[in-house]
Amino acid sequence: MKVYTKTGDQGTTALFGGTRVPKHHIRIDSYGTVDELNSHIGLIRDQDINPHYKNVLIDIQDKLFTVGAILATDPEKATLKSGKKRLNIPVISKENIAFLEQEMDAMDAELPQMTHFVLPGGHQTVSFCHIARCVCRRAERLATALNAIEPFEIHTLKYLNRLSDYLFVLARKLSKDLCAEEVKWIPKKNS
């Protein structure tokens, strides 16, 4: 199978299920941003970090492929009128969301209490986490806009929301592990 198909040369692409839409469609922007997020998470995973976090990130990357499949599916083709699934698309579960929450709780237990916003940076690996967090928030905004037009399973949105929180806590935990300075944002008074 060749990577190039030439079917998108006129500015359209096929959704899972065969429906063709313009490449600028919000659905394409949504799952394209999830794909971008997945690449940033791969970059974090490639850093010299605790193997436990690498394994969690592999799980997250797997779940992001699921999120991408959900977002790339024409809702009209996903289920039959009877409600039975037409296409074999995995789902994001409550347990997937709970897993992220448990991981955050475990990291939070080892961190000092947050009293201020934190400036992104301090170490390259930490910065990669903050970039991924921002891309995750963009993916969530786009997915929310898509959901308002063409609703999909709500756990998908919850997962993206929780994932951005996880990436923030991971950035803080890696700051601690890497002995990087965590710079608090303290607004300066007008002079």
Image (spheres, rainbow, N blue to C red):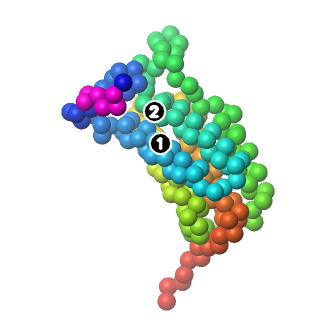
The image position of residue 17, as x and y in percent, is 39, 20
- What residue is rendered at 75% in x and 62% in y? 111
Give the residue pinned by disc 1: 34
In screen coordinates, is 13 left or right of 166?
Answer: left
Q: Nearer the viewer, residue 144 or 89?
A: 89
Q: Which residue is mark 2?
A: 71
Distance between the Cα atoms at labels 2 and 1? 9 Å
Cβ atoms under marks 2 and 1 closer than 8 Å? yes
Magenta region, main secondary structure = loop
* Left or right relative to 6: residue 48: right
Q: Amino acid at mark 1?
A: Val
Q: Is residue 158 visible?
A: no
What is the crowding at mark 2: few (fewer than 14 residues within 10 Å), some, or many (at least 20)? Answer: many
Q: Is residue 179 left or right of residue 137?
A: right
Extent of the magenta region = 2-7
Question: Which element carries disc 1, helix, strand or loop?
Answer: helix
Asked whether residue 18 appears in the rendered view, the answer is yes
